[in-house]
Amino acid sequence: MQELNQNNQQTDPVAAIRDGKEILLQAFNWESHKHDWWRNLETKVPDISKSGFTSAWLPPPSNSLAPEGYLPQNLYSLNSKYGSEHLLKALLNKMKTYKVRAMADIVINHRVGTTQGNGGKYNRYDGIPLPWDEHAVTACTGGKGNKSTGDNFNGFPNIDHSQHFVRKDITNWLRWLRNTIGFQDFRFDFARGYSPKYVKEYIEGAKPIFSVGEYWDSCNYKGSYLEYNQDSHRQRIINWIDGTGQLSAAFDFTTKGILQEAVKGELWRLRDPQGKPPGVMGWWSSRAVTFLDNHDTGSTQAHWPFPSNHIMEGYAYILTHPGIPSVFYDHFYDWGSSIHDQIVKLIDVRRLQGISSRSSIKILEAQPNLYAANIGDKISMKIGDGSWCPSGKDWTLATSGHRYAVWKK
């Protein structure tokens, strides 16, 4: 039966989304390329597995002009600043042994050229695999291709996905990552840069088990004050998911933006006017990947960081709630064993109580200093300074820490 299941998953791009039991680890930060990364991660695979993560998102594997991997050039060269192709394959093998899926960071909005072409720009790819000419580059970024189907990533040639030859080559590369190299999941970088219909085509072509897109634009602010209503922001993310034929999940940037203000004594923000969670999670939880920070918002870039003294309240929220929670490497491995162990305890409770991405939620309190909710009638939780406990004698305390508590039934 297990065997049958595995095969079904290979061909059905939404089996994992339907299952709703994913728990992700972002397994790198902005500095990882300096630390022999594939080798470092290999030593952590047993702990990643034991902690309950189903998938680990790895940094971009291809050769890149910038050491972090986000300016790719030769997509088929897997020797990067994170380590050699040999070390990468050793890591992927170990992950397979421990039943943690490997998620590839797919950077296909832009590609650094090798030679000068049209207009003296480096917009040709002579001398390397996928030797495209200027027709593979959008007209808006100095190529001879069509206008971009999304936003520009400035300063570099943006790939024109409307070209059939480009899509064929990208699909073949994704299939190679999936079937030959051994990545099972995909994370689509800078998904604002090209139409989601192409993401749909790539998922259908390469058949990853699980996919998530980075559709990141700014929340609604009045100056530096975050507005209560973020419906237009979450709607844009939902439109992107819809555009992928619902085959991809998306990072819930709306929830991140609201949660990091809410924990500073504004927990009333965590209930929308309809009584639901205010992020993508509240509207389409099976496609919402919730998180507190990533390599851009946190780490050494810190473009939009979660307040560090409220990290555990944040995890108490996303790890008990519907959606697909993702934990950031720094919090899990660099912030001390206490944080690591508290996160593991929350993951344990989530799994033992059978909470999934689609679990129902009833928000019971949303005051400045107290938020409380019942999830699937299997978990009750609170965050904030206010005191609260669930009514009824069936509840027992499952785990607690500074400004958070979780009960199980």
Image (spheres, grey):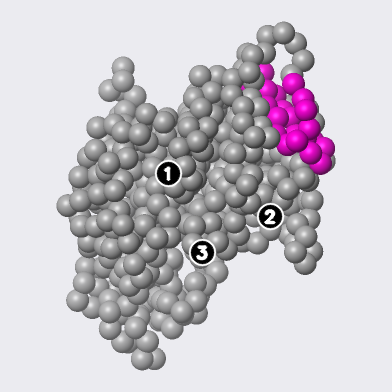
Which residue is at a point 33% across and 72% down the rendered structure image? 65
Numbered disc 2: secondary structure = helix
Q: Is residue 89 magenta?
A: no
| Quarter occupied by residue 76 | bottom left
Q: Which residue is mark 1?
A: 333
Picture quarter with the C terminus: top right
**Pointers 2 and 1 in contact (CB under 8 A)?**
no
Which residue is at a point 33% across and 60% down the rendered structure image? 33
Residue 136 lies, in percent from the top left, at 36, 73
| Quarter occupied by residue 302 | bottom right
Give the spatial CA distance, label 3 vs label 2: 23 Å
Please identify, in this view, whether the residue under mark 2 or under mark 1 is nearer the observer: 1
Please identify, in this view, whether the residue under mark 3 or under mark 1 is nearer the observer: 1
Q: Amino acid at mark 1?
A: Tyr
Q: Which residue is mark 3?
A: 301
**Mark 2, other Cα within 10 Å: few <14 / some 14–19 / many ≥20:** some
Which residue is at a point 64% across and 38% down the rendered structure image? 313
Looking at marks 3 and 1 on the same chain, the residue that comes earlier in the sequence is marked by 3
Q: Amino acid at mark 3?
A: Gln
Left or right: 333 as drawn, with respect to 239 = left
Tell me, for residue 233, which label it has, or none: 2
When the figure is inspected, residue 121 is found, relative to residue 42, above or below; the finding is below
Looking at marks 2 and 1 on the same chain, the residue that comes earlier in the sequence is marked by 2
